Amino acid sequence: TVAEPDPSRALDARLRGHETVSSASAAAHTAEIVVTATGRPGAVHAACLDRLPDGAMLANAGHSPREIDLGHLERTGPGRTVRPGVVEYRIADRAVFVLGGASPVNLAAGNTFGDDLWDLFAGITVLTCAWLVSGDWSAAAPGIHPVPAHLQRRIAESYLTPPKRSAHLGLIEEREPESPDGHVLQELVGPHCRAYQQNHSVACSTLAPGAVIAVHHHERIEETYTVLSGAVTVSLDGVEHVVPSGGLVAIPPRVRHGVVAGDEGARLLAVSTPPWQADDHHEAPH
């Protein structure tokens, strides 16, 4: 359902197969998911929020971080984080869930990397600024002009065909675990490494005898551990397993896991999919 007060835009939405109403409040009582795309503060205002059904989710895909009246929700009581980037608010006996703090959801909710960061708006901004600096527009008459066709084509080509990435050869370094906790971590592959990969990351842990990787879990990430040398004791949801050199441990999301190195220390290779992110590393019990 599209909420659109302008008749011509509402007709466009209707012809594209959408139900239409003149205001967000008119559709709020049946809305399961609300997405703003107006650029106008208060597009989803207090009266609209008060009509939402239990379990409704709200996300902002517009420009202003104030399109959803988050202040009204916060005045009803403190929010409760139910998973990274998702906060639950209570309105009387109902719960509503806000993604990304009501800021533009593609920028605020979760992390994206590499090719995903190409943004059409950024492309238009950068290339049109370059066009203005070049002086190619100087013969144009004063007034508002559309983006030139050759720039539109270049933007579209960049979006449809991301730059080719080069392969990379690397080496796991020999390092002694001299840190106070007896743990040296090398990030080998991932979005922020020279060995760039967008969809997974690889890290090597060198552990002194008895060194510990604290028990933790991930909501989104699945991991695979490979013991390169030594032996480790891995706990999986409270159950301990001794894993020798050459052993593998596959860890799905939400499984609490930790590592203790054996008497000779150990080296451990960890592959994370999607790439490891600090906001998805939870050491407190879930």
Image: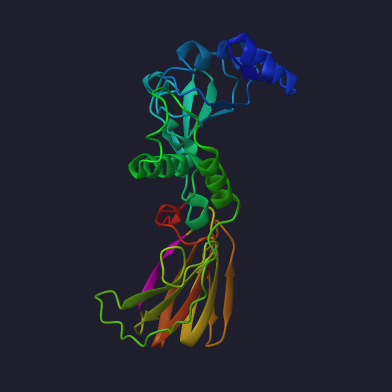
Q: Tell me: residue 101, above or below residue 67.
A: below
The residue shown at (49%, 86%) is: 228
Please tell me how many numbered marks the rendered image carries: 0
Q: Is residue 214 magenta?
A: yes
Asked which quadrant contains residue 212, the reply is bottom left
Q: Nearer the viewer, residue 134 or 239?
A: 134
Asked which quadrant contains residue 129, the reply is top left
Q: Which residues are magenta?
A: 211-216
Residue 217 x %, y %: 48, 58
Q: Characterize the magenta stretch by its predominant secondary structure.
A: strand
State left or right for residue 178 relative to residue 24. Answer: left
Residue 57 x %, y %: 56, 30
Residue 260 x %, y %: 42, 76
Q: Tell me: residue 56, above or below residue 128.
A: above
Residue 1 x %, y %: 67, 20
Q: How is the image coloured?
A: rainbow
Q: Tell me: residue 273, above or below residue 154.
A: below
Can residue 81 be seen in the rendering of this structure?
Answer: yes
State left or right for residue 264 relative to residue 92. Answer: left
State left or right for residue 146 relative to residue 79. Answer: right
